[in-house]
Image (cartoon, grey):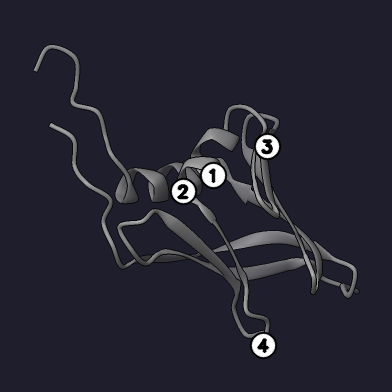
Amino acid sequence: MDQEHTPGVEVCTRAHLVTAADSGDTHRAVRISLRDAGGRVDIAVLGEGSAGWSLPREVLEQGMTAPAASGAARVWPCGRVTTVVEFHTGQGDAVLQLDNTFLTRFLSRTGSTPAPAGS
């Protein structure tokens, strides 16, 4: 039996963030959340006044294994342990590098999980 998207899941982690305005340390605390059953994932840098970014959950999941895109968001695997999430908006460009272990846990908590084989 598949479980449905779980609204209201919110987790924090550290990410490598690069923007045109960056200088110095590019490791930032970020909040990643799935707020509704529609499957939109919100990503925001903690402690900064920026509005953050949003992308479909499916694009984040697909981008962990092969390049995926939707609107201003692009996601692709970067080696075995990280995934890159890139946003191009009117406010500028941002590139985040996130740990795959963290993303896998987040996606398993927020999405449909197929039933184990043989059940």
As measured in the structure, the alpha-carbon distance from the residue carrying label 4 to the one carrying label 3 is: 27 Å
Crowd rating for badge 1 (residues with CA inside 10 Å; few <14, some 14–19, many 20+):
many
Instruction: Return the disc, 2 or 3, that comes first in the chain's sequence.
Output: 2
Instruction: Return the disc, 3 or 1, that comes first in the chain's sequence.
Output: 1
Is 111 situated left or right of 100 in this image? left
Residue at image position (48%, 59%) is 41
Crowd rating for badge 2 (residues with CA inside 10 Å; few <14, some 14–19, many 20+):
many
**Residue 90 image point, x, y percent:** 80, 70
Residue hosting label 4: 49
As measured in the structure, the alpha-carbon distance from the residue carrying label 4 to the one carrying label 1 is: 24 Å
Of residue 73 and residue 24, the one placed in the foreground of this image is 73
Of residue 18 and residue 53, the one placed in the foreground of this image is 53
As measured in the structure, the alpha-carbon distance from the residue carrying label 2 to the one carrying label 4 is: 24 Å
Residue at image position (39%, 53%) is 39
Q: Amino acid at mark 4?
A: Gly
Q: Amino acid at mark 1?
A: Leu
Q: Are marks 1 and 2 in contact (CB under 8 Å)?
A: yes
**Residue 73 image point, x, y percent:** 67, 51
Is 19 situated above or below 2? below
Of residue 97 and residue 53, the one placed in the foreground of this image is 53
In the rendered structure, find residue 57 and report the number of the disc placed on it: 2
Is 30 situated above or below 119? below
As measured in the structure, the alpha-carbon distance from the residue carrying label 3 to the one carrying label 1 is: 8 Å
Residue hosting label 1: 60
The quarter of the rendered structure image containing the C terminus is: top left
Crowd rating for badge 3 (residues with CA inside 10 Å; few <14, some 14–19, many 20+):
many
Crowd rating for badge 4 (residues with CA inside 10 Å; few <14, some 14–19, many 20+):
few
Q: Amino acid at mark 2?
A: Arg
As measured in the structure, the alpha-carbon distance from the residue carrying label 2 to the one carrying label 3 is: 14 Å
In the rendered structure, find residue 76 and report the number of the disc placed on it: 3
